[in-house]
Image (cartoon, rainbow, N blue to C red):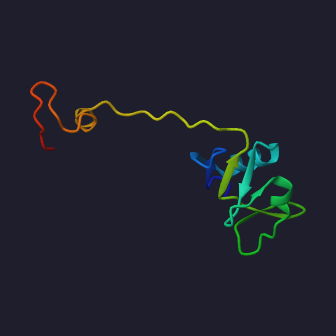
Amino acid sequence: MLNTAVLVLNRNYQPVHVTSVRRAFSLLYSGLARAIDNQYRLYDFDTWSSLSSANHEAISTVHRSIRVPRVVVLWAFEHLPKGSVRFSRLNIYARDHDTCQYCGAQLGR
């Protein structure tokens, strides 16, 4: 249960990466992230842990049962991770709209 996937969004609600439930709980507890529910409402750790865990996956502690968040929003992170594009012949043709750089002919894939 603690190693299942949780989607992490930045402050602009863009996906950043996927993490584990264990890491999501640590982000919530430290105040770096907020949990989001199906109605797109944000919760900090205290309000999230006070929600009912009926009909949801939950982690049980000594005193209460806490719902497992499926999506968390980072509170102060606005950047996107840099993606890398693989250098290949097909990617170069896609960049140049399938046009030969020597003769200018439009070639098919």
Q: Is residue 91 left or right of residue 102?
A: right
Q: Tell me residue 23's x, y (percent).
A: 70, 46
Which image quadrant is residue 90 in? top left
Quarter of the figure that contains the N terminus? bottom right
Task: Tell me what residue is drawn at x 54 percent, y 35 percent.
Answer: 81
x, y percent for residue 28: 77, 48
Q: Quadrant of the C terminus?
A: top left
User: Viewed as shown, does residue 100 lie left or right of 55?
Assistant: left
Up the image or down, 62 lies above or below 55; here it is above
Q: Residue 61: x and y, percent?
A: 84, 60
Q: Is residue 43 above or below residue 108?
A: below
Frontmost residue, 6 versus 34: 34
* Residue farthest to the right, as pictured: 63
Q: Is residue 47 above or below residue 99?
A: below
Spot the residue most to the top. 102
> Residue, x 67% and y 66% (percent of image)?
38
Image point (12%, 39%), residue name: 107
Image quarter of residue 65: bottom right
Residue placed farthest to the front in the image?
Answer: 104
